[in-house]
Amino acid sequence: MRARLAEVLLTDALPPAAYAVLVGPVPMPTVELTVHLGEALEEKPAAGWALVSMRSQQAGSGWAVDDWVVWSADGQMLALGRQTRRVLQPAGERAHRPPHWDSAGRSAG
């Protein structure tokens, strides 16, 4: 059970993928988090490091959607999921980000 909790914590521990293209921090609270656990930890706990691969599939109009996969050191998929975030701008501040990004992080508008 402890290993499963660690998998879920890894999925929500990293900053949003959209932060890679921002000039400064912007609040992005989680609206929805879905985690699908792999079968790799059913037999034994994973040893060593874990790799988390994350990318923003869509960001714009006040929303950002991140997809990610967590891999064990020996190459087994531990978890995958999707996180939807609300992109908030402080009142009266102009956005410090492109108005819309595509899945490759390029400004689309």
Image (cartoon, helix red, strand yellow):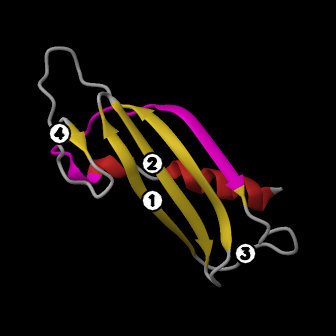
Q: Write down the quadrant of residue 59 in the picture.
A: top left
What are the residue bounds of the magenta stretch? 20-36
Type of amino acid at the residue the image marks with label 1: Met
Could you give the CA–CA distance between mark 2 and mark 4, rounded to whole angstroms?
A: 17 Å
Q: Is residue 89 left or right of residue 10?
A: left
Q: Write down the quadrant of residue 87 in the picture.
A: top left
Q: Secondary structure at mark 4?
A: loop
Q: Is 22 a magenta residue?
A: yes
Type of amino acid at the residue the image marks with label 4: Arg
Q: Residue at x 11, y 25 (%)?
A: 94
Looking at the image, is 108 positioned above or below residue 52?
A: above
Foreground mark, 4 or 3, reads: 4
Q: Secondary structure at mark 3?
A: loop
Looking at the image, is 20 positioned above or below residue 48?
A: above
Labels 2 and 3: the sequence-earlier one: 3
Q: Give whichever of 75, 100 is nearer the camera.
A: 100
As drawn, the label of residue 46 is 3
As drawn, the label of residue 66 is 2
Find disc 1 in the rendering and name its residue.
Answer: 54
Looking at the image, is 99 positioned above or below residue 39?
A: above
Badge 4 density bin: few <14, some 14–19, many ≥20, Cα 10 Å: some
As drawn, the label of residue 97 is 4
